[in-house]
Image (spheres, rainbow, N blue to C red):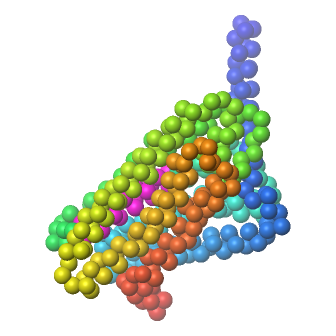
């Protein structure tokens, strides 16, 4: 009887210790002289990202000229970017402004899950957008039939749902590790590589699982995109006039720039050898795919797209 009571008392104590565990996000603590400059910079970037992506999202919903599958996917990408940047930047701004760098274990796990989920979803959505361009250029007569609204919705929903079980599992296996000693994460958000360094057990199995998931959601989408563009380029080169070739290339170039920026930085972060993992390099690479890509996406797509520019002018003139 007493043994049973003792065990039941110990178990909640262990759970309470786990639940109350906190990490410290160092972020840019090594640059205290730049604290307020960085706060102003990242706040400005966050506002610009929200306004620009929200504008594109609204344009694709409201303007009749932007009701094609390409702009449907672009609107969803803009919505995704707003969610993606909101997972990391607000906490980074809070840490810079208040110097309260502590983050509870549950909050850290939640942040990691959404970063992984939104990042994986973006990889799949970029491959869907490449497929859309492939059908539009290689099979123009069948494009309205193939890329109907129902299929477009299914592709977007599939991009989101496919990632959920993988990222739930990956987050669970990371936070099932025992963390001992230092709880300082040398990063501005809860990411996998710096957290694995804090584990006090062998993490080779966890690292292998990270590689497998990265291959599924970075390399496989990249190969699909590569396959789509190899067919696209082959078709474009067969077009009779130079103006037709130029127009076809211009509809794809914006997407290619985003793919290279996002998938390039993401693959280097999660697929590079452990021996080459440096904390400063990891932070810089993370800035590319969590902040720079959402910032540049609206610029890349709007400045190089006459339909978006015209829709924006009509909206501003109202």
| Left/right of residue 116 with respect to residue 310 in the rendered view | right
Quarter where residue 221 is shown: bottom left
In the shown orientation, is residue 234 left or right of residue 95? left
Give coordinates of residue 37: x percent, y percent.
Answer: 76, 72
Q: Predominant secondary structure in magenta?
A: helix
> Which x, y percent locates residue 69?
31, 69
Residue 233: give x, y in percent of width and height: 28, 69
In the picture, which quadrant includes the N terminus? Answer: top right
Q: Is residue 141 left or right of residue 165?
A: left
* Residue 131 in magenta stretch: yes
Residue shown at 35%/78% (left/top)?
Answer: 250
The answer to whether 177 is drawn above or below residue 52 in the figure is above
**Residue furthest to the left:** 141
Identify which residue is drawn at 79% across, 55% down. 100
Residue 219 in the image: state x and y as whole percent: 42, 51
* Nearest to the observer: residue 19 or residue 196: 196
Q: Give the residue at x 68% y 69%.
A: 42
Residue drawn 32% across and 76% down? 249
Furthest-top residue in this view = 1
| Residue 317 in view in this figure | yes
Does 302 lie within the magenta span? Answer: no
Identify the image quadrant of residue 22: top right
Residue 161 seen in the current view: no
Frontmost residue, 154 versus 277: 277
**Which of the two residues, 145 or 235, is positioned nearer the viewer here?**
235
Residue range highlighted in magenta: 117-137
């Amino acid at each position: 009887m007493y043994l049973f009571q003792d065990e039941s008392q110990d178990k909640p104590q262990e759970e309470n210790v786990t639940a109350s565990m906190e990490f410290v996000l160092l972020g840019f603590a090594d640059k205290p002289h730049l604290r307020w400059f960085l706060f102003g910079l990242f706040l400005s970037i966050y506002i610009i990202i929200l306004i620009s992506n929200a504008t594109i999202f609204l344009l694709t919903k409201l303007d009749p000229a932007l009701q094609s599958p390409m702009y449907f996917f672009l609107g969803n990408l803009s919505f995704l970017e707003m969610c993606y940047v909101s997972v990391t930047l607000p906490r980074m701004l809070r840490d810079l402004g208040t110097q309260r760098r502590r983050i509870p274990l549950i909050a850290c796990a939640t942040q990691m899950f959404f970063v992984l989920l939104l990042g994986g979803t973006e990889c799949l959505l970029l491959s869907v957008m490449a497929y859309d361009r492939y059908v539009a250029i290689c099979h123009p007569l069948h494009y309205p039939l193939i890329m109907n609204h129902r299929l477009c919705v299914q592709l977007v929903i599939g991009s989101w749902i496919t990632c959920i079980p993988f990222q739930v599992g990956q987050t669970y296996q990371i936070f099932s590790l025992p963390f001992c000693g230092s709880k300082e994460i040398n990063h501005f958000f809860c990411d996998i590589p710096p957290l694995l360094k804090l584990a006090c057990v062998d993490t080779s199995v966890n690292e292998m699982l990270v590689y497998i998931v990265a291959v599924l959601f970075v390399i496989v989408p990249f190969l699909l995109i590569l396959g789509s563009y190899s067919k696209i380029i082959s078709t474009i080169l067969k077009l009779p006039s130079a103006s037709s070739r130029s127009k076809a290339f211009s509809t794809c170039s914006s997407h290619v720039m985003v793919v290279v920026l996002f998938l390039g930085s993401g693959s280097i972060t999660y697929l590079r050898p452990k021996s080459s993992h440096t904390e400063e390099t990891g932070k810089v690479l993370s800035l590319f795919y969590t902040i720079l890509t959402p910032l540049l996406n609206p610029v890349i797509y709007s400045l190089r797209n006459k339909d978006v520019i015209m829709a924006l002018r009509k909206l501003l003139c109202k």
